[in-house]
Amino acid sequence: MHSQITAVLNRVNPYIPELNDIARDNAEKVLNYIEDINLDRDVLFRPTSCGSLSIAWKIGDWEYQMECVKNGYIIYTFTKGEYEKASGCVLFDDFIPQFEKFLLML
């Protein structure tokens, strides 16, 4: 498991439920994908009050907001210069093609 995700899991907060295996696995897959493309990895992880994991990644003018939720979906919003370019809620396998499309615009 990636150290960033482990750090989030080790935070104890009685108001935030633990991540389930599905949300954690999807967060791992997203981080693995980001590592595989060898881009700057200044990624911010934050647990949410509903037990999901929010991931924020900024590269230049682009900002990628992703939330790995407990039911296996990824809720995402991609913005460039504060203008929304894409958003949606899809399963991981459908998310990666969308993510790749907007990464190619860097």
Image: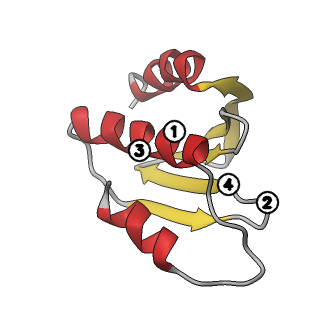
The reply to whether callout 2 and callout 4 are in contact (CB within 8 Å) is yes
The image quarter containing residue 95 is: top right
Horizontally, is 77 left or right of 99 in the view?
right
Which residue does the numbered mark 3 point to in the structure image?
28
Considering only vertical position in the picture, is 43 above or below 33? below
Q: In the rendering, at what x and y percent does residue 80 appear? A: 58, 41
Amino acid at dot 1:
Asn
Q: How many marks?
A: 4
Judging from the image, the colouring scheme is secondary structure
- Badge 1 element: helix
- Badge 3 element: helix
Q: On the rendered image, what quadrant is the C terminus found in? A: top left
**Any mark on residue 52, and which?**
4
Chain-order first, disc 4 or disc 3 = 3
Which residue does the numbered mark 1 point to in the structure image?
26
Q: Residue at x 37, y 65 (%)?
A: 4
Considering only vertical position in the picture, is 106 above or below 46? above
Considering only vertical position in the picture, is 75 above or below 11? above
Which residue does the numbered mark 2 point to in the structure image?
50
Chain-order first, disc 1 or disc 2 = 1
The reply to whether callout 1 and callout 3 are in contact (CB within 8 Å) is yes
